[in-house]
Amino acid sequence: MKNTHFKRLMLLITLILSTLFLIACKNQDDGDKIPPDNHTLYREVIRDDIPQVLLDELELGFHFFWDLANTDKNSGAYGLIPDRYDTKNNRGGNVASIASVGFGLSAIPIGIEADFITREEGEERAYYTLLTFKNDLDRINGFWFHFLSMLDGQRVWQSELSIIDSAIMINGALVVGRYFGGRVQKLAYELYEEMQWNWYFDHNANKFYMGYWPERNPQFQGYWNGYAEQLMLFILAAGSPTYSVSKGAYQLMKFNSTLVASTADYGAFYPTWTGSLFTHQYSHAWFDFRLYNDQNGFNWFTNSVNAVDAAIAYAKTQTSIHQGIHENSWGMSASDGPGDTITSGDVYRGNYGSGPAQGSNSFIVDGTVPAYGAIGSIVFRPEQAIAAIENYRTYENFWSTYGFKGAYNLSKFSTPWFAKDIIGIDKGISILMIENYLSEMIWKIYMEVPYIQTAIEELDFQSVT
């Protein structure tokens, strides 16, 4: 009798152990499992009566990212996209920007649903681009270097290991991951989960570092202090299941920012240091801030609307000084500008901007207006942005194979100056915001990413009622 009970007990233990083993094996298999494909169509409803220039800029801008990417799978740089395109000589640059890749990945669903490319073409480009970022490129704690060789993916110019450009790149990865599902989603989510946001963060100062150079001492330099384009960092870091940063960093950033008072021309808003308009656009290309207030009831979409109103109001004050700045030519922001003479080379200036700015003496205005300033603001002030875009299209020398060139200046010389290059990130914010205006597609896809929903909870953002 005792022997029978013993045998039954041993059999029960064996069954329990076998079950636990099978569960463990299943969980391990689930980690390697390819998620189901996603076949949702996100562009079923688009706006009517769209000016042709918007559709042209969208299509040609998409082809900037599609046509110029490295498509050699044996190069170690597949999927990299040039930082610049030379419109004078019709050739892409030999240096890639990882931010340009992030915008280019985000553009792939646009290309598919606008029938510029097939789904199969887009899925292959997305997957093998992410594979490059997984296996071929130098990476430290999940982050990538800012500028890379288009030929082999090697770091160039001793560029920084960039948190903000890595964030833009991973935003693009999350978009295609959610859009396609399947192997693209698996790879995109793995890349995101490997990013150690809490390493790129000074826990004593409660701030993200701005740049990291492995050969410098100290290696981390600078901080993201007040409000700027880095809102995306707080979202991505808060949503991380592996290396998260708490909402205190977001709260300190807001505390360190200065709210300017409303005027007859614009509502109160947090300006950025240089008043460059891109700082009010970038994070909004992916996260739909229309839908959420922070825990204090503040809405960042409204902040950008007010910043755009302020930029337009500022442009009107410059009309008597600069011929090319007025109510239909506004949005001064970081871009190429003219050199000292009409024949000298173009000069990139990161501190083109409009007042008011948090650094009152930190922006310059010389008559240079970038196309993307207004285009990237189309979701905030559609009527004013479209009027500016239609005005820009009247200058034939401002147009190129891939749509608008970088910037123009009508007042510095006796003849108009037009930028020679298109800059990838300028073209990127232009087409993503046009698409969000047309269909809200990028917003819809990105807001479905589970990590982003986690971030909303972690940051205590509240739905707008």
Image (spheres, grey):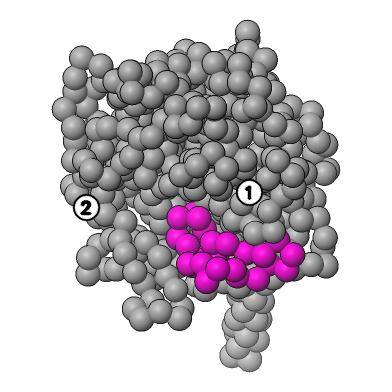
Label of residue 363 in the image: none
Type of residue at label 2?
A: Leu
Q: Is residue 442 visible?
A: no
In the image, what residue occupies the spot 59% across and 56% down? 98
Task: Quadrant for residue 302, please give it.
Answer: top left
Of the residues under marks 2 and 1, which one precedes in the sequence?
Answer: 1
In the displayed image of the protein, which residue is found farthest to the top?
49
Residue 221 in view of the camera? yes
Query: Compared to 22, does 192 lie above or below?
Result: above
Residue at left offset 72%, top offset 55% = 79
Q: Is residue 96 left or right of residue 263?
A: right
Q: Residue furthest left?
A: 261
What is the span of residues highlighted in magenta in the rendered image? 142-167
Q: Which residue is mark 2?
A: 252
Q: Nearer the viewer, mark 2 or mark 1?
A: 1
Where residue 250 sits: x, y (%)? 28, 50
Report x, y in % for residue 277: 40, 35
| Disc 2 element | helix
Q: Residue at x 74, y 44 (%)?
A: 89
The residue lying at 57 percent from left, 26 percent from top is: 434
**Where does the image place residue 422, in percent across and percent down from the top left?**
62, 41
Q: Residues within 10 Å of mark 1 (few under 14, many from 20)?
A: many
Closer to us: 297 or 3: 297
Which residue is under mark 1?
84
Magenta-colored stretch includes residue 153: yes
- Indicate whether 104 appears above or below 208: above
Q: Are marks 2 and 1 in contact (CB under 8 Å)?
A: no
Residue 170: which quarter of the image? bottom right
Q: In the image, is residue 357 part of the stretch drawn in magenta?
A: no
